[in-house]
Amino acid sequence: MIAIVFPIGAAFLYLAITSQLFARATWRKVRPVSALVIMGSIAAPWHVLAMLRNPPYFAFSMHSGPGEYHGFFWFYFINEHLLRFLNLRYPRDYNTVPRLWFWLLHLLWPVDRAGRTRLFALCWIGLVLIFFTFSTTQEYYSMPAYPAFALLLLGSAMSEASVWVRRGTKAIAIVASTAVAIIAVILVKVWSLPTPGDISSALVQHPEMYTLSLGHMGDLTLQSFAYLRLPLALAGIAALVGSLGIALYRQETRRQFFAPALMMLIFFHAARIAMITFVSSPG
């Protein structure tokens, strides 16, 4: 349902703001009927088959509790969408982050084509964040807005004269440099620590935090980083590449963007290696 609500909602909001909502030319370009037919032909068969294999076919109960199951339709559309939005879903094996932080975690930055693109991206972001402001919220719920953030970043990257681009690039360099220093200190402290068994023996359990998707981060201890020396070193190299690249190309704005891009590429590889360390742990 979210995959339908967000794109259509963002498009309607954008068309309304730009006074194109009731223009016949707009709907000729959008072609809503053919678009719905194509989308339905792709998505409907799986959902219909799932409903037929998991009866009852239609149930609209607004109560969700232990031992209650009313078929796939109810579970998928009512329990997992409507009741989750209202914070009534069962089981309640999740938690919610404060709405203020949900917004603050996404610090942001019209007549021409670029301006219309930025406006559309802002409508997209605003719809997603406002929608989940009135729902139960977890950290990753804002992921449908990330492509819109990418559009804004791309638009800023193409505007070399933007003061916000220069400030943002400096901020990235400062954060990356700070990360290099912190990672270096941690590596020095854990380099000679023994690593018997697996990483689970060095973690401190905090089950009260596990209802948040990032709750297990609280389990990390200084000793646990001894098991993560390789990915930690790679993360340090990534941050060093980013900070040095930005400094070396400070007079060439476009080339500067390759440094953060390479930094993210190396960092994601480091995160993949760290994830393997945790997955291989029986704990």
Image (tube, rainbow, N blue to C red):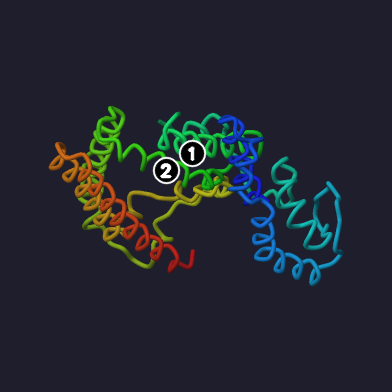
Residue found at x 65% / y 40%: 24
| 1 and 2 marks in contact (CB < 8 Å) | yes
Identify the image quadrant of residue 272: bottom left
Between 188 and 19, the one nearer to me in the picture? 19
Q: Quadrant of residue 10?
A: top right
Which residue has dot 2 on it?
151
Regarding residue 105, the answer to whether it shows in the image is no
- Viewer-nearest residue: 231 or 169: 169
Relative side of 12 to 119, left or right:
right
Q: Residue at x 53, y 49 (%)?
A: 213
Task: Give the image location of residue 1, x and y in percent.
Answer: 68, 51
Residue 133 appears at what percent x and percent y?
61, 34
- Helix or strand or loop: what does disc 1 sit on? helix
Indicate left or right for 215 with 188 as reference: right
Mark 1, other Cα within 10 Å: few <14 / some 14–19 / many ≥20 = many
Residue 12 placement: quadrant? top right
Count of all numbered marks drawn on residues in the image: 2
User: Which residue has dot 1 on it?
Assistant: 121
